[in-house]
Image (cartoon, rainbow, N blue to C red):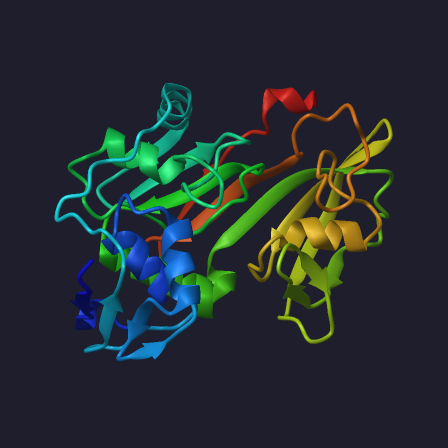
Amino acid sequence: MAESFIEVSAGHADRRIDKFLRAQLKGVPASVIFRQMRKGDIRVNGRKVDPNYRLQEGDRIRLWQMDLPADLPPPVVEKRIFKAVVDSVLFEDAELLVVNKPAGIPVHGGSGHGAGVIEALRVKYPQERDLELVHRLDRDTSGLLLVSKSTSVLRELQEILRDREEEIYRGYLLKVEGAWPDGLRQIDVPLKRTETTVVPHPDGLRARTYFEVVKRLSGATLVKAQLATGRKHQIRVHAQYAGHPIVGDRKYGGRMKQASMMHLHAAELAVPRGAGRLQKFVAPVPDTWGI
């Protein structure tokens, strides 16, 4: 198969290459792109780069050993997932979609999962050529998810999340095992990614989460969490670090066997929308929590 090239324009400068390629190669599974990068079949200016590489204007990306039809067909989205995603759209305007993502549905396909939220939305809104995830939620986390309709809005919001995280308020509700201490209101422990998980580690990235007890339950506690940083699995690992893993979180120590799904929900979101305006969104916890 012949090699292909993409030249990066000024409008995409400073974007992470993995996010850029997933936007450019709609329909190509993320797992394929990541595998090609690990193998060095995707190169920038002749050099192998990792997924975190930030593009510069004029960068020349080489794609090798990958079939890239000029017009990739839309992915096959299960009817169940399509309906669940479409029914969960809470807000839409000319720039944004806000989805109350159900637990158990990935935000995108790949990595062993079929089509997810973004693929379903692209089927629902074929006229919106620039639909992209602003941020992500774990597959088993429910709640508020931002999807942009334009590259400019995507870059603006992702820049805020990267450089000025405090400007976007993200409030979560979680049900944890045991009695969360009233005095434990902040966990500031760096986190490091391994091949399969995330662990507290002094050499990791700064990670801070604020916690507040909402309600005492039988054998559990309903807790509110606010992210000060946005590390992978941050709330889950910090809850485990505190000795109170999230109910249903098998990966990070959850032991309550009666829970069929992880009890972590992105409940509140406040987003800057220009001219000093802050737009707020709220999503109630799923009925399955029984609260």
Q: In screen coordinates, is 157 left or right of 232?
A: left
Q: Residue furthest front?
A: 1
Q: Residue at x 67, y 65 (%)?
A: 191
Expressed as whole percent of the image width and height from the top left, the position of residue 106 reads: 47, 38
Q: Residue at x 58, y 60 (%)?
A: 231
- In this view of the protein, which residue sits in the foreground, 138 or 78? 78
**Up/down of 25 relative to 6, above or below:** above
Q: Which quadrant holds the C terminus?
A: top right
Q: Residue furthest left?
A: 70
The quarter holding residue 3 reads bottom left
The quarter holding residue 244 reads top right
**Up/down of 252 relative to 15, above or below:** above
Please indicate, yes or no, whether residue 59 appears anywhere in the rendered image.
yes
- In this view of the protein, which residue sits in the foreground, 20 or 283? 20
- In this view of the protein, which residue sits in the foreground, 7 or 35? 35
Q: Residue at x 81, y 30 (%)?
A: 256
The quarter holding residue 62 reads bottom left
Q: In screen coordinates, is 50 left or right of 47?
A: right
Q: Which quadrant holds the N terminus?
A: bottom left
Q: Residue at x 70, y 44 (%)?
A: 251
Please indicate, yes or no, whether residue 275 appears anywhere in the rendered image.
no
Q: In screen coordinates, is 102 left or right of 204?
A: left
Expressed as whole percent of the image width and height from the top left, the position of residue 253 reads: 78, 44
